[in-house]
């Protein structure tokens, strides 16, 4: 049987950590050296391997952002151009509605005056007429006015009246037209159904 070996000298007493050993200056020096070593290691990690990545990683990130910058600038230019086009369309649309659509407050008087002016110019006699106003679905400020109006006069004046309505600055649509001749003479009775459009910003259509 081999003899057993012991690295502890025979008869050597075991040392225990005591308060006296803690107060030993050599122990304090070792602790201070260990702390400095840990601090140096931490500083090296921060300097050479930062949490955000190494210097190479940061260089790659900067290079990638430089490459993407022209694309971002081009997208910004496209967005600005789109905004300008939208603004231009909004302004032109507002001008169109101001020019060709009736104002909500004065819609009835405006359309009556327009029809009476055209009828007087071509010598048609206005008779009874009715109006109705309905909001346009999907819009809170636009409505359609339907006008049913009857006139009396020579047939040739009827075509002139239609031409006058076509020249009107207002956007009007002739939905239907019915003409019936009188028993005597060239006079005819005409029934029009017209559609005009109203712009109302104050909620009068609701």
Image: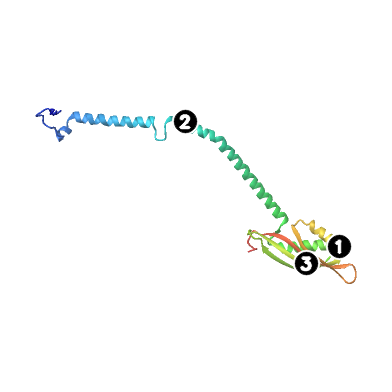
Callout 1: helix, strand or loop? helix
Q: Residue 82 at x, y = what percent?
A: 62, 44
Q: Residue 31 at x, y = what percent?
A: 23, 31
Image quadrant in which you'd find residue 5 = top left
Mark 2 in CB contact with mark 1 (< 8 angstroms): no
Callout 2: helix, strand or loop? helix
Q: Residue furthest front?
A: 1
Q: Which residue is depicted at the point 59% across and 38% down?
A: 74
- Whichever of labels 2 and 1 marks the residue nearer the N terminus, that label is 2
Above or below, comparing residue 47 to residue 79 in the picture: above
Q: Residue 47 at x, y = what percent?
A: 38, 30
Mark number for residue 157? 1
Tell which of 199 and 154 is nearer to you.
154
- Rounded to the nearest angstrom, the CA distance separating label 1 from label 3 is 16 Å
Q: Residues within 10 Å of mark 3 (few under 14, many from 20)?
A: some
Mark number for residue 149? 3
Residue with the mark numbered 2: 59
């Amino acid at each position: 049987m081999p003899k057993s070996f012991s690295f502890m000298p025979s008869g050597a007493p075991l040392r225990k950590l005591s308060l006296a050993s803690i107060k030993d200056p050599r122990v304090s020096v070792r602790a201070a050296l260990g702390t400095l070593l840990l601090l140096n290691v931490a500083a090296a990690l921060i300097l050479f391997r930062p949490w955000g990545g190494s210097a190479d990683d940061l260089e790659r990130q900067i290079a990638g952002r430089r490459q993407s910058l022209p694309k971002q600038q081009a997208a910004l230019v496209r967005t600005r151009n789109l905004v300008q086009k939208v603004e231009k369309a909004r302004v032109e649309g507002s001008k169109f509605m101001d020019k060709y659509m009736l104002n909500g407050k004065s819609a009835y008087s405006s359309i009556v005056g327009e029809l009476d002016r055209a009828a007087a110019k071509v010598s048609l006699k206005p008779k009874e007429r009715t109006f109705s106003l309905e909001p346009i679905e999907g819009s809170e400020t636009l409505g359609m006015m339907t006008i049913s109006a009857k006139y009396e006069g020579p047939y040739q004046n009827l075509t002139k009246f239609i031409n006058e309505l076509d020249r009107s600055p207002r956007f009007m649509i002739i939905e239907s037209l019915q003409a019936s001749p009188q028993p005597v003479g060239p006079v005819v009775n005409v029934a029009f159904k017209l559609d005009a459009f109203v712009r109302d910003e104050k909620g009068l259509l609701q």
